Amino acid sequence: MAKNNASVWTSIRFWRRSAAWVTGVAVVLLIFLTFDTMSQIRMGTDKELEQGIKRRIPAPTVINHHIDYKYDEKRGMEVPVIGKKEPFFGKEWSPKEARALLHLGKLTVQAKNCMDCHTLLGNGAYYAPDLTKAWLDPMWEKTMPAMTGKKTKEEAMAEFLMHPGQYRTHARAMPNLKITPKEAMGVVAFLKHMSSIDTNGFPRGFSKVIKEGKTGGTYAK
Ligand code: HEC
């Protein structure tokens, strides 16, 4: 074999092989990560919810449950807690009904472009409060029912969405987007479901932000 004095760093063969290896390993890693992410973001089934099997994104029937949150010491962040069953707009929603209602809410949120002003799951604007955990804002339980003359949290929220100018809570006002009563129910279901999603603590420290009455950490007055 002829003696090659040149350093390995100048060998074209070495660089070609390295490139092939790096590409190969990256492809395998990306395939693994894709499947891992898919399983994390898959919506849970109604059965899993009934059996108390935790999923990051619970089934639509989670709207039949009380949603709360607690600080998880181990993870160092707030996580949603899915509690006991409670009526939502006065009834328990079947899996099919819950799915349809959530779908209507999602379409309404898209059609009315809530993201023009609000943030949902990290997407949108910071003109108005972050809506990712808006359902957990204690004002829907404490002040809004009396203010709107409604008995429940969900009815108060729906009433606010239909006539936001009448129940102002911030310096900026939300415009009337001509949301119908059915659409308002859908949007409330959509927001309640969203609050049950384990978002790895996003928006950061939301309990504190909510308690101080300014949902949306970067919401500027
Ligand atoms: C043009 C900007 C704009 C658009 C579009 C908009 N909002 Fe708002 N929204 C606001 C502002 C400003 C506030 C704060 C005013 C207030 O609370 O009185 C607000 C407040 C809210 C609140 C109360 C938040 C809290 O917890 O304090 C909810 C819920 C809400 N909006 C939902 C929606 C939904 C759902 C849509 C889409 C259907 C939407 N908004 C579209 C500007 C907007």
Image: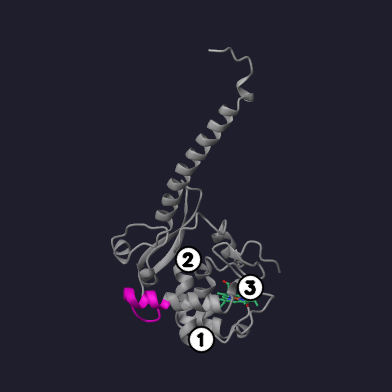
Task: Say what secondary structure mark 1 lies in.
Answer: loop
Q: Is residue 86 above or below residue 200?
A: below
Mark 3 sits near ligand 1, with its Cβ under 8 Å away: yes
| Mark 2 burial class by Cα count in 10 Å: few <14, some 14-19, many 20+ | many
- Where is residue 200 drawn, in percent x and y? 50, 54
Please count the marks in the image. 3
Farthest right residue?
221
Q: Gap between marks 3 and 1, in whole Å?
A: 29 Å
Q: Position of residue 33 (x, y in %)?
A: 45, 47
Q: Which residue in the structure is indicated by mark 2?
A: 195
Residue 204 vs residue 35, the one in the foreground: 35
Q: Is residue 46 left or right of residue 135?
A: left
Earlier sequence position, callout 3 versus callout 2: 3
* Picture disc at residue 116: 3
Q: Amino acid at mark 3?
A: Asp
Assign a secondary structure to mark 2.
Answer: helix
In the displayed structure, does residue 149 sit left or right of residue 42?
Answer: right
Which amino acid type is shown beneath numbered disc 1? Gly
Residue 193 percent across, percent down from the top left: 44, 69
User: What residue is rendered at 54% in x and 58% in y?
Assistant: 202
Cβ atoms at labels 3 and 1 below 8 Å apart: no
Disc number lying in front (3 or 1): 3
Q: Of 150 and 55, which appears nearest the observer?
A: 55
Bounds of the magenta segment = 88-101
Say if mark 3 contacts mark 2, CB within 8 Å: no
The secondary element bearing badge 3 is classed as helix
Quarter of the picture for ligand 1?
bottom right
Q: Earlier in the sequence, mark 3 or mark 1?
A: 3
Measured in 3D between alpha carbons, the distance from the residue under mark 3 to the one under mark 2, in whole angstroms, is 20 Å
Q: Is residue 111 magenta?
A: no
Q: Which residue is mark 1?
A: 149
